[in-house]
Amino acid sequence: MQLKYVLLSLGLTIFLAGCNDARQVDPLTRALESGGFVSRVTNSVLTPKISIQYDGKATATQKMLIHGSQLILSGHPFGFSNWDVGSNPLNPRLQFAYAININSFSPFPSWLPDYYASGAMAAMGRYVVSSGAAGTSLIDIGIPDSSRELRRYPERKLTDTQVPRDEDYVYRAIITHPTEPYFFGFREQDFVTSLKIDGNGLNLTKKTAYARNGDKGTCCVLGGATFKGAAYVGFRSSVRKYVFETDGVIKEGGVYNNINGTNIVATNDYLYVQHQAIPGNTLASGIYVIDGTGNSVMYLPIVPVAFAVSPDNRYLYANIDNTNVTVFQINWGY
């Protein structure tokens, strides 16, 4: 009887510990483990309201984000641009475009989105950090209609005959620390770098490998965002959670293999995970919206090239086919 009592007590202890852990797990874990993803296909959840182009031309946006009242785009034929969406979200107003401000934008030559803004982009305060095939660019957007590049990594000298490239600054996702002045650049398959804002520049303070104990690297980073104090990064066939420590240290906090995260966007209230269905996966392709408690609250039946969401979660801005940016109204009461 005594042994049975001990075993019963141990079982209850483990069960209660599991319940306590369940209350503390992150939103993506809850959504995946509960199987509660909202995947009902309905077109009424999104209403296209307006489409915008740069200078009336086909507009292929590679990366986009909303920062405060600004919609920030990188791509062709504009290069880098700011649009005011705070005054009227359904009528974005162009404030700045690199294509018409080439001489004032940067003291360095040959800034192209393919080199410095095709892979990843993030914003903090007055700064945008963007990365492409050659390296990383630090851009000041504090005065929206006079945006300018402050630094470039690696440095581009006037005497260079070719565009220099540094693998340490070529990223596929960039996320921001929720409280400290750090950006984190995720390379496609080998490591993440900690980039501290230091004066008017970035200081690379740490490199952390994805693989451990000599294992092969991990493929392949596609995008990420910071949500509720943690980072969620898409690795093609999975999503990985990262937790922040002090002094620019970031470490892996979980791997979720049931969802193929491509574009990942966050507002204060929701995490938007774009999923691309792969063989063996039962989830439909589209954007799954997850709240801070781990409930999948909405499914958006689109698969954009890139997208951003307004801070109030009322509007979604998307590059669907590389011809324009379409503004959708999100119908929460559908």
Image (cartoon, rainbow, N blue to C red):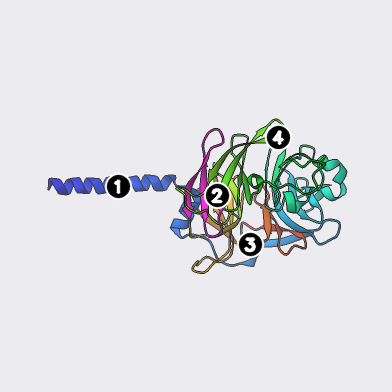
- Marks 2, 4: nearer the viewer: 4
What is the x, y in percent for residue 274?
A: 60, 58
- Marks 2, 3: nearer the viewer: 2
Q: Residue 244 lies in magenta, yes or no?
A: yes
**Residue 232 circle label:** 2
What kind of element bears circle 4?
strand
**Residue 316 circle label:** none
Residue denoted by label 1: 14
Marks 2 and 4, how far apart at CA? 26 Å
Residue at 77% from the left image edge and 42% from the top image edge: 156
Residue 49 placement, left or right of 233: right
- Marks 3, 4: nearer the viewer: 4
| Crowdedness near tag 1: few (<14), some (14–19) or many (≥20) residues, C-alpha within 10 Å | few
Residue range highlighted in magenta = 234-256
* Dots 1, 2 in contact, CB < 8 A: no
Residue denoted by label 4: 201
Residue 58 placement, left or right of 193: right
Residue denoted by label 3: 45
Q: Amino acid at mark 1?
A: Ile
Q: Earlier in the sequence, mark 2 or mark 4?
A: 4
